[in-house]
Image (cartoon, rainbow, N blue to C red):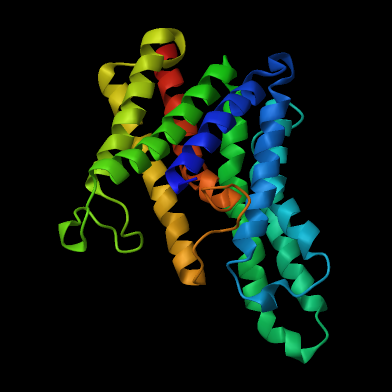
Amino acid sequence: MTNLALRLLVFAIGLPLLGLAIFALPGLEHPFFALLVCVAAALAAHETASFFSSGALRYRGRRIVLPALGALLPAVAYGSVHGLWSADAILFVLVVAVALVLTVQILRRDKGEFLDILPAVESHVFVLIYPGLFASYAVRMLEFPMAGRVVLVFVLAVYLNDSTAYVTGRLFGHRRPQDREFVVPISPNKSLAGFLGGMTATFVVLFTAAHLWPDEFGGTPLETGAIAVLIGTMAIVGDLVESALKRSASIKDSGSLIPGRGGLLDSVDSPLFAAPIYYYAYELLSMGRMV
C-alpha cells in the first residue's frame, strides 16, 4: 500500500473515532476528548524527548517521568474546565514543575553526570511546554459553550488543511528540483500548491461553520477569513517546526506508531501549534459578540 493510501486510510478511520471522542458524554465536559489529548501529549512528549542527547535521559524513571510531564498541563487544564481551580493554575503548575526539574539537578553526586545537567533541564522543560502547554489549549476549548462544535471545527480545520495540503502538493506540486516553488529549506517537499490547497480547506471549514452555527462562529466575513488565515498558517508552521526539530536530531520520523505518518508527534504537530491561536481567536470572537 502506498504512503498516500495509508495516510488516507488512517485519516478515514481516525477522524470518525476522534469525532466520537469529542461528542461522548458532553455533560461531563467531554472527558474522552480530554483523556485523548492527555494520552497524545504523553506519547508525544516521549517521542520529543528522543530528539535530545541520551545523556539527558540517563535515569530509570524516564519512561514514566517524561510522558507524565507531557500530560501534566492538559490534565490541569481539564481540572480548570471542571471548575476545580482557575485557569491560572496552569501557570502555577508550570512554574512548580520547572522548579522541581531544576532542583533535582543538585542531587547529582557523580561528577561524570554534571555535564548532563543542562541537556536534562532542556529536555524536561521542553516537553512540559511542547507538547504539554500547547496541548493544554485543546483541552481549554472545552470551556466554551457548545464546546463539541468548537473542538470539531478546530479538528476539521487543522486536519483537512494537513491532508489537503499533502494531496494537492503530490498532485500539483513541483515535479523536478528545478521546478520547486515556495520551498522552505527545512522541509523542501512543501510546495505552493500544497500550501494553497491546505489554506483553501481551512477557509471552507471556517465559513461552513459560520453558516451552520452562526451563534458560535457567526463573525463578520473578515473575522472568519482572518481566523482561517491564522489557523491555516499555524497548522503549516507547526508541521515545519517539527520538521526543524527532526532535522536537528537527524531523524526522519518521530516514531513508527502510525502507519503512513510515522510517530504520533508527526500527526499532532499541526494541531499543537494551532490550538493556542484558535483558542484565543475564538475567545476574542465570543467577546465581540457579547459587546
Horizontal relation, residue 112 to residue 37: left or right: right
Q: Is residue 26 above or below residue 245?
A: above
Residue 82 can be seen, yes or no: no
Residue at the limit of the structure toward the left, as seen here: 178
| Relative to 101, residue 95 above or below | above
Please give the name of the residue rendered at 71% of the width and 62% of the height, measured from the top-left corner.
Answer: 99
Q: Position of residue 154 (x, y in %)?
A: 48, 28
**Residue 169 appears at what percent x and percent y?**
29, 44
Q: Residue at x 67, y 72 (%)?
A: 120
What x and y, as percent, mark residue 44? 62, 52
Residue 77 vs 179, above or below: the answer is above
Q: Position of residue 142 (x, y in %)?
A: 61, 25
Left or right: residue 142 compared with residue 213: right
**Image quadrant where residue 189 sits:** bottom left
Q: Write down the quadrant of residue 170 in the picture.
A: top left
Q: Is residue 260 visible?
A: yes
Q: Residue at x 31, y 60 (%)?
A: 188
Quarter that holds the C terminus:
top left
Note whether 259 is above or below 275 in the view shown.
Answer: below
Q: In the displayed orientation, state which residue is furthest to the bottom.
A: 111
Q: Nearer the viewer, residue 149 or 86?
A: 149
Q: Residue at x 45, y 8 (%)?
A: 215
Q: Residue furthest front?
A: 1
Counting every numbered tag in the picture gives: 0
Nearer-the-camera pick, 267 or 134 = 267
